[in-house]
Amino acid sequence: MITLLLTTLALAQTTGGDAPSANGQLYRPVMDSQHTLWTNTSTSPEGFAARGWAHYARDPVVYVNEDGSANRVLGDVLQMDVLGSWSKGPMRLGLDVPIYVRSGGDQVGGETGLGDLIVDGRGTLVDRDEAAVGLALAMRAGLPTTTVQAPLGSRGLSFEVEGIVDKKIGRTLLAANTGVKFVPTNELENITLNDQLFVRLGAGRELGDRAGVSLDLATHLNVADMASDATPLEALVGGWGRVSDKGLVLRGGAGTGLSPGFGAPIARVVIGVGMEPPDVPDTDGDGYIDTVDQCPLQPEDFDGVADEDGCREPTVVMVSVTDPDGGLVVSEFLFSSMGGDVPGATAAPAMLYGGSYTISLSAPGYLPLTESAQIPDAETHMLSYVLEPAAKPGKLTVVIVDQDENPVAGATWGLPNSPGEDNGAMIEVDAGSYYLWAKADGYRLADKPSVRLAEGEELTYTIRLQPTKVELTAERIDIKESVYFETAKAVIKSESFGLLDDVAALLRDHPELTLIRIEGHTDSRGSASYNLELSGRRAAAVKTYLEESGIAAERLVSEGFGESKPIDDRNVAEAWEQNRRVDFFVAERSD
């Protein structure tokens, strides 16, 4: 049998007197430490935790009479503690409700009752996972609610301030607590019990992810008499095991006093059971710890489908698309979200995770539709949409003929800014009014600004081209006839009006020709000076005719060259006729 640990205290009582108003049960189970049974740690898993403790202490307070006999002031204590705590971020609040199942000694018989309620708070100053060590400050208040006569409570309010430091080294956690406990003063025969300095040291070693062992040492010093032999020192060896992934944890330990101090028992046994947030992380926060969560980075959606694996299941999304009359429309769709695009068709469902999407629908003959879609976390979900029919296009065919109603070979036609279609080709266009153009080599460019199609109309339109006596090349406007003047004059003959009208029409159809140089030439008969002056007047006369035909003056310039640039050097009538001419050169163009 372990030798009784006798105190040298002379308690202020005599046989048959009242028990002292002091708490001889120094052990207080930890509120939320995961690794130790007595020493507090700086952090705890977030959420609500509940623990129930049963602990037995043998002879924590024994008085030695002058004749050497032992007086068991507090002989046996069987205590239950119900603890609840709530942690959020760096803060933790807790409540400890002690219940004495059996307590007593030589002067007090077996008692059952309530102990001092403890309100506990802790704030983490430095998270040990983010720094070299963890630091925290804890404060707790003890309320004088004890209902037993044994020395298991205080006459008044007690208060503690505690500093906590800990460090995790691999699977081992080291922790230390030190602080001051302010209690009502008890005057004993040869010692005063009052405010106390306390120290606790703890170490916990994880044995895998579900179990571990621990060692705690605890002592306190009375501020009024730090050298007293009544100073207790106690050791507690323990362990824990997690028996459920939902948070059920069993804890237990045994210890003894290492010095004959007030409150140090011969033997102590503790057993605890708790429902606690797991110390193993739950990264995705879905209630399944990472060791059992098949998808630790993706939270379970709890939609009634395979909710026990910790994985989010996609929702089967059916898409129904109808026309305004309720008829089903075979449609293609595209779901777009931050995670990418999910294409599909109404004939098959889409597999989507709950969230916000944009759905784009399209079907031949219908206007496209884009809508936002909220997909729930569910087994199935139906989306319904109505597509409006698109307007039916019209069909336009253009036939290009000459003045004799014969088709013009090589002719093309088109809408503004279009590359053009072959003569007789058909295109589909929406209902509306359109400008048309038609062209062919040897004919004037034609445009028709008033062609109108109704929805679904099929129209064949005929454009008649007028032949032209001019042709545009990259460097000049070639004319197929000569410009004729009255003899020795700068008067244009009427037979050349049609030719110059064709030149004016070409310039109107080609605004990119920003400057045309009109050159006048004569044959070699007459003096060179006279011929130079005559050619200049004739070129100027052509310029004036074009201006009067609506061509801007700044697009035209004229110059006479007389007989200096003959085409044929022979001194014959045939050569003279060729050399008497007007030429049109492209001096500048915007394209």
Image (cartoon, grey):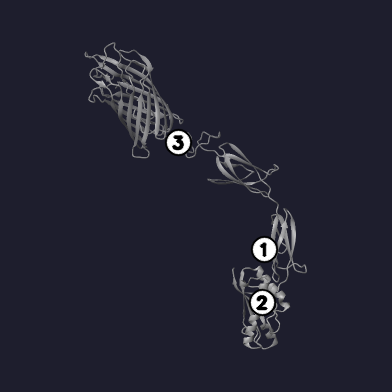
| Residue on which the image places disc 1 | 420
| Residue on which the image places disc 3 | 282
Please report the residue visible at 73 percent of the width from the left and 62 percent of the height from the top.
398
Structural distance between the alpha carbons of marks 2 and 1: 34 Å
Badge 3 or badge 1: first in the primary sequence: 3
Q: Is the residue 300 above or below the residue 525 in the image? A: above
Badge 3 or badge 2: first in the primary sequence: 3
The quarter holding residue 228 reads top left
Badge 2 or badge 1: first in the primary sequence: 1
Secondary structure beneath disc 1?
loop
Q: Is the residue 92 above or below the residue 450 in the image? A: above
Q: Nearer the viewer, mark 3 or mark 1?
A: 1
Q: Where is the C terminus found, in terms of image quarters?
A: bottom right
| Residue on which the image places disc 2 | 542
The type of residue carrying mark 1 is: Gly
Structural distance between the alpha carbons of marks 3 and 2: 94 Å
Q: Are marks 3 and 1 in contact (CB under 8 Å)?
A: no
